[in-house]
Amino acid sequence: MLKVLIPSILLFASSLAYGQVKEGLNIDLSTLKKESWTEQELSNAKMITDFVQNLMNNHNFEYIIKHYNNSAYVQHNRNLPDKVTGLVDFLKEFVEDYPEYGYDVKHIYVDGDHVIFHSHVTLHKEDRGNDLKGMNIIDTWRIEEGKIVEHWDSIQALDLSMRIYALVNGGNIANSNGVF
């Protein structure tokens, strides 16, 4: 009996552990899209959703380089370098320290070639859904000829640890593009 019970328990425990590691945030565009969007605006929203899902939630950096490293990508967040490769290099290091980092997209707005995400960003899985933890971020991307060419963001730290993090890391200027 123990020969059957012990392997069954181990198999069950390992499947639980695997499920917890694989559990992540998924952006559900079907619930966030607006009926008023044009076909082009929906296409732009799909592109940014794919970009953010793979970059921020799946941390699939090879996919991002393969599919989105074809534009100038001007970065207006003064702490990040220009180009998709600069963003990927930054995030590769960042997720080494915060592997559970993720974007929980709450709202998506599209106006022509501009796509705006309003998101709750957390560093730790246990903070997801707790609007007293993490960051409130509004990202805006501009798309030109089917390519992501520009990015702006506004970040609000929601708790003391994130405010301290922003204070410590906020002075490193990585580009000269200006915030507007």
Image: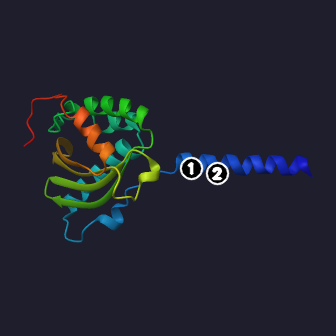
Please identify the quarter of the rendering in which residue 78 is found.
top left
Vertical position of residue 58 compared to residue 129: above or below: above
Query: According to the image, label 2 marks what residue?
Result: 16
Vertical position of residue 11 compared to residue 74: above or below: below
Residue flagged by tag 2: what amino acid is it?
A: Leu
Query: According to the image, label 1 marks what residue?
Result: 20
Residue flagged by tag 1: what amino acid is it?
A: Gln
Q: Secondary structure at mark 2?
A: helix
Tell me, yes or no, if residue 70 can be seen here. Answer: no
At horizontal 89% and vertical 46% (from top left) the residue drawn is 3
Q: Determine whether, in the image, residue 120 is placed left or right of residue 4.
A: left
- Residue 142 at x, y percent in the picture: 15, 47
- Residue 59 at x, y percent in the picture: 40, 40
Q: Secondary structure at mark 1?
A: helix
Q: Residues within 10 Å of mark 1 (few under 14, many from 20)?
A: few
Residue lying at the far bottom of the rendered structure? 35
- The residue closer to the viewer here, 38 or 80, is 80
Number of numbered tags placed on the structure image: 2
Q: CA distance from mark 2 to mark 1?
A: 6 Å
Image coloring type: rainbow
Residues at marks 2 and 1 touching, judged by CB atoms closer than 8 Å: yes
Q: Residues within 10 Å of mark 2 (few under 14, many from 20)?
A: few
At horizontal 40% and vertical 35% (from top left) the residue drawn is 95
Vertical position of residue 42 compared to residue 140: above or below: below
Q: Determine whether, in the image, residue 15 is placed left or right of residue 24.
A: right
Vertical position of residue 157 compared to residue 111: above or below: above
